[in-house]
């Protein structure tokens, strides 16, 4: 027994602390999927000090309420302070968070949740163990992390569950021993029947948990909504392209993405914003393999770069000029394109305001022309990975605004530009470019011929660059991925048709959008595990899988990260971009057009259950609770009977007599507190219960201070068993 001044900590108290610690670590592990052992000592210290505090004020009477309120106020203020770290630049939380490789906001929420859960569970469990022992309430409390596990579809039962149940059983045993002798905590019995009963209860608990905690649940989790895969850009000082994150994981490792607004965008329609791209996939993460891709050109875009953004239109203009000069008489398939209508290019402007959040780079929509600040000039650059950055190592600061000019160049269906795109693959595109290069100098306008030649060579160089940098496939991608890509695109001819077929493959009903997707096993590739086994994931898994399938089909594709601007706030008259709007998507290089965003991520669907299934689920839960309650009552009674015969005969006889009267009263017999043992014996005799022998021995032991032997105790226990289920 440990003693701290006026506190005496028995094994019962220590088990209570251990039960609280296990439950706290269990729920933190379920909610954040982070290594909770790093906070084992702080959590244990918080709960130990709280336990001593509760233990001290337990006998204070009404004044204890004041102490409890003060304790709750302190916890609340600390909780608010920790939460404020998520939106400030407190360096020590960044330093602590770096140990578990999570960004500062995640770690700040983790700390605040740790404080809240530690104090909440120690208060609940102290009350329902030390003040009033209510094991069924403890089982219901444990249902909180267990339910979250079920909703997340965890493939295995958490080890914390086994530890929790084991400690709860030990508490049961100590409590039953205490009740048997009415003295603190004797040695537990070690009989065959005792341990067989314990083993049966353990087996029932383990089997029930194994049946309940199964994978495959598609229900979303409100806590894990904050914990999606790492897409967002986290704060770092002194931005340069070299200080950007070096990789982006393709597994389901979570990070915090909340409802916190980070941008306000005044635009005429929803738009995708890019923040950066990646060219190489290896070891379940995307990397930047070629530093040359980080080199950028200055904004605004030059006239030639804008022409390349309008590639399909400019190509058709070249074809139209050649046709007017009579140079395409032997190419009717090209002149046929000119019969379709032109798809006009639309120009847009968006005003972006950052909200209490500092960013690495500027938002970059497809078709970007320029970015400007109405109040100060910006020296901005854009590189091949679509990172838009300032040359002077500055970045958009909180509450800073800038204007984005961009154009929508993707053509309408059945337009001449769309017909051109739908007819090209890399081979036919190169043939078209070479054919046009051979004919442009036959025009009468030499200056125009020179401009056309320069443009066509740029088109050829752009395809060559895309093919060179965005077709890499690592050795971890096996033949089955190549086979799947060929199977999906077997009936397609052009690059656009193949990419569209691969995108549509994810909408075939086999895949599920799941924020709580299974973690990729260490010995498996994340993309192949998603494609062929789990088929559950977030935008990161969908975008990574489509990128790799396109590359396996010979289509240059890059993995991109950014935001989806689509939530409109009518009260403010603008779009709101929140952290949770961070998104990943593939960009496919389409010959005759350029880079185009595809959307393989299927929308999240709400798991709707029929009324019958809900009723069956409710019945199952009620049956589970009933079985646990029944087993707990049976076990408690059996433990008491086993323990009582090992006590001192005098104490054992008094305990049997008192417990029997409680049981008979509960069964419906009239027994009042004011009655003497003799009166009770007479009244029960009138009701058909003969307690004369037991009453005589009880009076001798209790009032006459006489001794009794083990035989009397065994006879009394036998009488207790025979009358246990007796009713009037």
Image: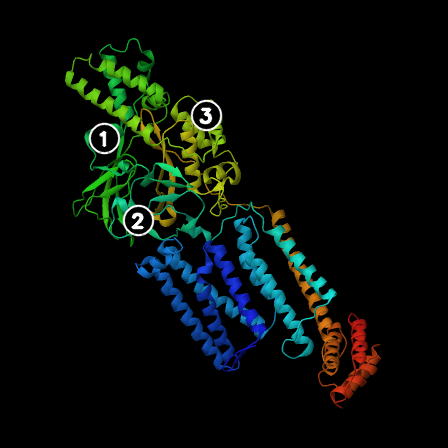
The residue depicted at 49 percent of the width and 76 percent of the height is 52
Q: Nearer the viewer, residue 352 or 298?
A: 298
User: Which sits earlier in the primary sequence, circle 1 or circle 2?
Assistant: 2
Label located before the other in sequence (3 or 1): 1
Question: Is 5 situated left or right of 307 in this image?
Answer: right
Q: CA distance from mark 3 to mark 2?
A: 39 Å
Front: mark 1 or 2:
1
Q: Looking at the figure, which quarter contains the N terminus?
A: bottom right
* Alpha carbons under labels 3 and 1: distance apart: 31 Å
Q: Quadrant of residue 333?
A: top left
Residue 492: image x %, image y %?
Answer: 44, 23
SS class of the residue under badge 1? helix
Q: Is residue 497 above or below residue 573?
A: above
> Where does label 1 land, which residue?
305
Quadrant (top left, top right, bottom left, bottom right) of the C terminus: bottom right
C-alpha gap between disc 1 and disc 2 = 28 Å
Instruction: Kindly identify which residue carries mark 3.
Output: 489
Q: Nearer the viewer, mark 3 or mark 2?
A: 3
* Closer to us: 45 or 398: 45
Label placed on residue 263: 2
Residue 436 in picture, x, y percent from top left: 26, 16
- The secondary structure type at the circle numbered 3 is loop
Q: Helix, strand or loop at disc 2?
A: strand
Q: Please tell me which of labels 3 and 2 falls first in the chain.
A: 2
Q: Residues within 10 Å of mark 3 (few under 14, many from 20)?
A: many
Q: Tell me the tag on residue 687.
A: none
Residue 584, placed above or below residue 450: below
**In the image, is 691 to the left or to the right of 347?**
right
Residue 670, image x, y percentages: 76, 78
Q: Quadrant of residue 111?
A: bottom left
């Amino acid at each position: 027994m440990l003693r701290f001044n006026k506190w005496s900590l028995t094994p019962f108290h220590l088990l209570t602390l251990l039960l609280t610690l296990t439950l706290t670590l269990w729920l933190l592990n379920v909610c954040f999927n982070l290594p909770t052992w790093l906070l084992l000592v702080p959590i244990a210290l918080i709960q130990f000090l709280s336990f001593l505090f509760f233990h001290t004020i337990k006998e204070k009477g009404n004044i204890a309420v004041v102490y409890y309120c003060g304790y709750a106020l302190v916890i609340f203020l600390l909780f608010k302070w920790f939460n404020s770290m998520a939106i400030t630049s407190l360096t020590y939380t960044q330093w602590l968070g770096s140990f578990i490789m999570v960004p500062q906001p995640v770690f700040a929420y983790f700390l605040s949740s740790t404080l809240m859960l530690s104090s909440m569970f120690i208060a609940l469990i102290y009350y329902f163990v030390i003040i009033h022992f209510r094991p069924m309430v403890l089982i219901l409390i444990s249902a909180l992390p267990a339910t979250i596990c079920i909703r997340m579809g965890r493939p295995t039962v958490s080890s914390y569950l086994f530890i929790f149940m084991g400690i709860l059983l030990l508490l049961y045993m100590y409590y039953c021993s205490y009740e048997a002798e009415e003295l603190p905590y004797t040695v537990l019995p070690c009989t065959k029947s005792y341990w067989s009963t314990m083993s049966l209860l353990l087996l029932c608990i383990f089997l029930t948990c194994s049946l309940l905690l199964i994978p495959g649940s598609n229900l979303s989790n409100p806590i894990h909504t904050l914990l999606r895969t790492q897409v967002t850009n986290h704060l770092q000082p002194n931005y340069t392209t070299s200080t950007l994150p070096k990789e982006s994981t393709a597994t389901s490792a979570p990070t915090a993405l909340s409802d916190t607004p980070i941008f306000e965008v005044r635009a005429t329609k929803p738009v995708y914003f890019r923040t950066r791209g990646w060219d190489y996939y290896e070891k379940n993460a995307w990397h930047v393999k070629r530093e040359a891709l980080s080199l950028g050109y200055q904004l605004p875009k030059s006239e030639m770069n804008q022409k390349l953004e309008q590639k399909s239109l400019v190509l058709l203009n070249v074809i139209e000029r050649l046709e007017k000069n009579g140079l395409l008489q032997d190419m009717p398939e090209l002149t046929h394109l000119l019969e379709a209508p032109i798809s006009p290019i639309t120009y847009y402007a968006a005003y972006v305001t950052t909200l209490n959040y500092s960013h690495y780079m500027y938002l970059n929509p497809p078709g970007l022309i320029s970015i400007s600040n109405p109040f100060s000039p910006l020296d901005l650059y854009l590189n091949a990975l679509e990172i838009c950055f300032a040359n002077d190592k500055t970045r958009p600061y909180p509450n800073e605004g800038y204007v984005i000019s961009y154009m929508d160049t993707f053509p309408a269906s059945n337009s001449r530009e769309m017909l051109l795109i739908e007819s090209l693959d890399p081979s036919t595109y190169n043939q078209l470019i070479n054919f046009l290069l051979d004919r442009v100098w036959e025009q009468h306008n030499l200056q125009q011929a020179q401009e056309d030649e320069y443009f066509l060579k740029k088109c050829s160089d752009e395809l060559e660059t895309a093919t060179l940098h965005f077709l890499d496939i690592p050795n971890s991608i096996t033949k089955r991925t190549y086979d799947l890509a060929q199977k999906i695109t077997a009936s397609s001819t052009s690059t656009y048709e193949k990419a569209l077929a691969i995108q549509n493959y994810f909408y075939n009903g086999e895949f599920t959008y799941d924020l709580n997707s299974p973690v990729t096993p260490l010995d498996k590739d994340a993309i192949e595990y998603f494609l062929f086994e789990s088929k559950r994931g977030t935008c990161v898994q969908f975008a990574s899988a489509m990128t790799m399938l396109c590359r396996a089909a010979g289509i240059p594709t890059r993995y991109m990260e950014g935001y989806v601007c689509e939530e409109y706030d009518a009260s403010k008259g603008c779009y709101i971009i929140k952290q949770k709007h961070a998104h990943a998507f593939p960009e496919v290089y389409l010959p005759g057009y350029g880079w185009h965003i595809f959307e393989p991520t299927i929308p999240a669907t709400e798991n709707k259950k029929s009324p019958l299934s809900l009723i069956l689920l409710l019945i199952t839960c009620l049956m589970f609770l009933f079985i646990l309650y029944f087993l707990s009552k049976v076990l408690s009674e059996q433990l008491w009977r086993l323990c009582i015969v090992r006590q001192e005969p005098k104490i054992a006889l008094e305990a049997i007599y008192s417990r029997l009267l409680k049981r008979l009263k509960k069964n419906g017999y009239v027994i009042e507190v004011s009655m003497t043992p003799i009166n009770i014996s007479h009244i029960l005799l009138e009701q058909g219960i003969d307690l004369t022998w037991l009453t005589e021995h009880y009076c001798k032991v209790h009032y006459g201070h006489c001794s009794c032997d083990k035989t009397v105790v065994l006879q009394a226990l036998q009488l207790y068993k025979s009358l246990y289920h007796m009713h009037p």
